[in-house]
Image (cartoon, helix red, strand yellow):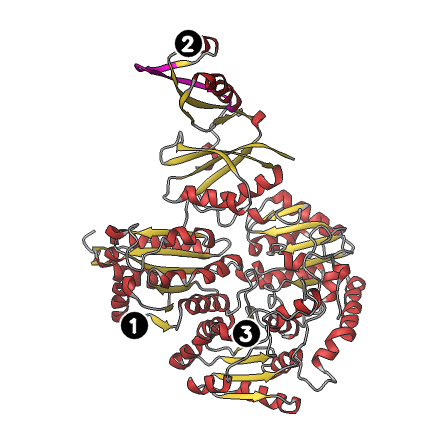
Amino acid sequence: MEQEYIITIFSENSKGLLNQVTTVFIYRDINIESITASESSVGGIHQYTIVVRSEREKVEKAARQIEKKIDVLKVYVFTPEEVVQQEIALYKVAHNKDVEKLVREQHVRILEVEDDCIVLEKTGYTNETQALFELLKPYGVFQFVRSGTVAVSRYNKELLEEYI
Amino acid sequence: MENTPVISGSEAVIRSLLAEGTETVFGYPGGTIMPVYDALYGYREQLNHILVRHEQGAVHAAEGYARVSGKTGVCLVTSGPGSTNTVTGLADALLDSTPLVVVSGQVGSALLGTDAFQETNFIGITQAVTKWNCQVKRAADIPAAIARAFYIARSGRPGPVVVDITKDAQQERAPFRYEKVTQIRSYTPCPKPDRDQLAEAARLIDQARRPLLLVGQGILTGGAEEELAAFMEKSGIPAACTLLGLSALPTDHPHYVGMLGMHGNYAPNIKNRECDLLIAAGMRFDDRVTGNPKQFGANAKIIHLEIDPSEVNKIVRADVPVIGDVRETLPLLTELIGRREHEAWIEEFRACYDTEYRKVIESELFPSTSAIRMGEVVYRAALAFDAEAVIVTDVGQQQMIAARYSRFRKSRSLITSGGLGTMGFGLPAAIGAKIGAPEREVCLFAGDGGFQMNIQELCTIMQTGAAVKMVVLNNGFLGMVRQWQELFFDRRYSFTEMQNPDFGLLAQANGIPYRRVEQREELEEAVKQLAESKTAFLLEVKVEQEGNVFPMVPAGAAVSEIRWA
């Protein structure tokens, strides 16, 4: 059955690695919904968080094939229930009384106020940032961007520790 | 660091290759690799360079060299077309787990990414067809990159790697100090065997009444031939080989029951469904082996001895995966199991062989038709070489026939493109095999189609004097495609008929002795002449035009749908 999976990859910070990782998803015919990459808690080691919709078996097989890449340390596959996940979204919208009301109701941060627009920030699940976007749409959204999901597992220690 | 010499990056390439024990390099010079070739000139006594006629020839030759010798094959090519010409060979080596190091020249680092002359993004291109690749832009980084390349290419499950070196890095001078790589923290080449898995596997083996061992190339790449023999001796279990597993045990082993797969032997193909236990050792359940994977070993528990964790449960679910190097896991298993015999069970395989002999083999080896059949040629060659030769094949009907009817006494005696099915592999691979094992006879079987795909390498034979024995089984067709057209496309022979050149003149042009056989009466003597020739020899045999390879399990079909004609 198709569902959402969150894949966490730890790798050396080597050039071209992202390409190698995404190649496996192309090879196994899995589309990437979102992807983030940055340095992990361990210096020199990068962490990728990739969200896909697919079948468990297919995702697991892709994970093993990614793990096989020389510079990849470890790959974990999680269901949404197994992680705490968030993403950040920025919205540039026009000044407007109704928008200000939305800001208060939706627990949205104001990052910057310009003469003719304001930049808002909301963190939450994808459906929440999307919902806010839908609410703001009628008032005119000049720009909208999402970070892609980041996630930590529900285990209480750093996943990487036992592998380096 | 006072005693570390300061040398050019080019010389560092050569000295690094020598430090890894490289004796032979297959290559072709060009613009961006010229500094390395210049350095090679000074080392031509220490490093044997084989000048091929096309970079695809270089990489297949390096594969043949690696497969026959167990050493790492090395190629040296220039940037742009020189490097892209190696891509097919890299893909071939990746699928067949062949250790290769391809060193490619690259445009100067200042020109990278500018569409410079003979520039391609070789790292990007080869990411999907290598085990690992890297680009080097500083002379000082060359030794470490090559050390890493060799370590990755030959450790664990072997594979091809690419080291792409910019021209300025080749020309720059830097201190040279070589240190072999012995571990990489993000890479576990040989996972440690799990004792519980081994114990569970041994328990299943001891309980099994109808077990079958499936022998893959892992036995050869792991160098576990003796360990396999010991396991078979104690367990009494019959063994079948995959195409690439052939020659891991002698074909006359009393418990050897034949080859698996689409054109494999009837016994293991049909009996895997009746087994209560399959022990897969160093094989990956390729779809050409399993047919319909749902029915393969459908009634059996499956033990999978495998070095690459990503292969476990990929195609067929393993009840007990035993992850690790078979050279390590097989003896541990042998120790745990009880001594058994399975004579009655093995007798059932023999009965199946008799069926196959009556239906197919007899008429292939001893035909009553006037046209020569491919099988009888392979059989004659096996006799003439006394089953001691390294058999190299191209891809297609002759490949399957050579695999079916060759006889093997020694390990590493069949070199063929299994996973990628690369036509044009045979001729250059045979050259590489001869260079990798000069003391052995090397006999190539190629079809008239595949032989022409890298036929320029006849000139490499001329220049190197590699004494390759070549048999072209000429049916005037792209035979395997024609066979499928006959069986599955209503005999619509769409562009499979070949109008061939005069192979005799091509041989003559390259100073290679040649003989053509059209009559069965000449065959035995001609094959003998081929076997006894001290130099390279090309034997062209005109075989039955529309000969087919049977039995055949159609792609994706269950083995019960096996076709005999």
> Mark 1 sits on what residue?
B44
Q: Main secondary structure of the magenta part?
A: strand
Q: Label 2 lies in what chain? A: A
User: In which image quadrant can residue B153 be found?
Assistant: bottom left
For the residues bearing labels 3 and 2, Cβ distance under 8 angstroms: no
Residue pictured at 47% horizontal, 65% vertical: B63
Magenta region: A110-126
Q: Is residue B209 left or right of residue A115?
A: right
Are both tags, 3 and 2, on one chain? no
- Label 2 packing within 10 angstroms: few (<14), some (14-19), many (20+): some
Depth-wise, is mark 3 or mark 2 nearer the camera?
2
Q: How many marks?
A: 3
Q: Amino acid at mark 3?
A: Gly
Q: Position of residue B184 (x, y in %)?
A: 41, 46
For the residues bearing labels 3 and 1, Cβ distance under 8 angstroms: no
Q: Amino acid at mark 2?
A: Glu
**Front-most of residues B447 and B349:** B447
* Res B180 seen here: no
Depth-wise, is mark 3 or mark 1 nearer the camera?
3
> Mark 3 sits on what residue?
B449
Marker disc for residue A100 = 2
**Front-most of residues A66 and B494:** B494
Q: CA distance from mark 1 to mark 2?
A: 79 Å
Residue pictured at 58% horizontal, 25% vertical: A81
Q: Position of residue B553 (x, y in %)?
A: 71, 62
Q: Position of residue A74 (x, y in %)?
A: 48, 38
User: In which image quadrant can residue B116 be found?
Assistant: bottom left
